[in-house]
Amino acid sequence: MGDYSYFNQNLRARTKKFAVSIILFYAKYCKQTEELRVIGKQLLRSGTSVAANFRAFTRGRYEAEKFSKLCIVVEETDETQFWLELIEEANLLDKSIYFEIKNESDELIKIFTATKNKMKK
C-alpha cells in the first residue's frame, strides 16, 4: 500500500475521536430505556473497535496482515452504522442527538471501503 503515514496518522486521530464520541453518546443517552441499553452496549463495542482495529491496521507488518485488519475495520464500522440505524428506525432518540455520529460513521465507511478496494488491486 506504500507510505501513507499522513493518512494513517489522520485517521488514527479521527477514529479515536469517533470512539470517544461513541463513549460519550452511550454514557449520556443509552441508559434511558432497556432497548437503548442493549443497543447502546453493542454500539459501544463496535464503535470503539473501529479505532482499536484501525490502530492495529497502521501497525501491520505485512500487506496481508494490514488488509485483514482493514476488513475488520470495515466490518466494525458497518456494524456501528447498523446499531445507529436501529436507534433511528425504532425512534428511540431524536435524530439530532446522534446525527453527527451517524454522519461520521457514513464517511468513515466510505473511506475504509475505498482503501480496502484500492488494496485489493
Image (cartoon, rainbow, N blue to C red):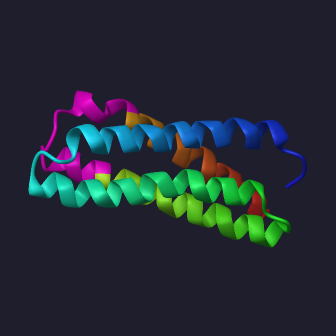
Q: Nearer the viewer, residue 100 or 22?
A: 22
The quarter holding residue 78 reads: bottom left
What count of labels does the image hold?
A: 0
Specify the segment rendered in magenta: 84-100
Q: Is residue 113 left or right of residue 77?
A: right
Residue 39 % position (x, y): 24, 58
The quarter holding residue 72 reads: bottom right
Residue 42 % position (x, y): 32, 61
- Give the residue at the far left of this rendering: 33
Tell me if residue 61 comes above or below residue 36 in the rendering: below
Q: Is residue 90 magenta?
A: yes
Residue 72 in view in this figure: yes
Residue in the picture at 56% in, 42% down: 16
Q: Is residue 46 left or right of residue 88?
A: right
Which image quadrant: the C terminus?
bottom right
Q: Nearer the viewer, residue 23 or 81?
A: 23
Q: Is residue 91 left or right of residue 86?
A: left
Residue 117 in view in this figure: no
Give the dominant element type of the magenta stretch: helix, strand or loop.
helix
Residue in the picture at 62% in, 51% down: 112
Residue in the picture at 75% in, 44% down: 8
- Give the residue at the far top of this rendering: 96
